[in-house]
Amino acid sequence: MGLEPERTRDVLAGADPYELLVLKKPLGIESHKGGQPIRRGDDAEQCIVSWLRADAATTVDLNACARASIFPKE
């Protein structure tokens, strides 16, 4: 991922994923011109966080990712 590569590397090594702009801006933690497209607890948040935390022992939440990809929401 090209956005904040050093911080991303830290997150992939176990740091807090909520320090990354890829979560801060869409969750409204940091100001974002596009508003707040993701809400806390949404499937999109779960998908992104699980992807950032995935390793040999922890997998990506594929169900949350699949639900997040449905647009418009049913």
Image (tube, rainbow, N blue to C red):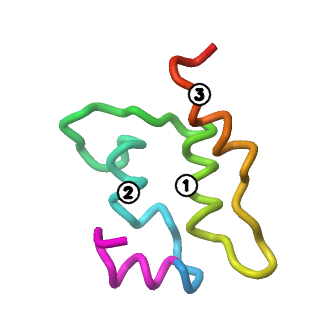
Q: Tell me which amino acid carries mark 2.
A: Val
**How many C-alpha atoms fall within 10 Å of the one at disc 1: few (<14), some, or many (≥20)?**
some
Q: Secondary structure at mark 3?
A: loop
Question: In whole angstroms, how far apart are the C-alphas of marks 1 and 2?
Answer: 9 Å
Report which residue position mark 3 lands on.
Answer: 70
Which stretch did the figure color magenta? 1-11
**Left or right of residue 70: residue 18:** left
Q: Position of residue 55 (x, y in %)?
A: 70, 78
Task: Tell me what residue is drawn at x 37 percent, y 53 percent.
Answer: 24
Report which residue position mark 1 lands on.
Answer: 48
Report which residue position mark 2 lands on.
Answer: 22
Q: In the rendered structure, does residue 7 fall within the stretch colored magenta?
A: yes
| Occupied quadrant, residue 63 | top right
Q: Tell me which amino acid carries mark 1.
A: Ile
Q: Position of residue 72 (x, y in %)?
A: 51, 17
Helix, strand or loop: magenta stretch: helix
**Foreground pick, 57 / 11:** 57
| Occupied quadrant, residue 4 | bottom left
* Up/down of 18 relative to 47, above or below: below
The circle drawn on residue 74 is none
Q: Tell me which amino acid carries mark 3.
A: Ile
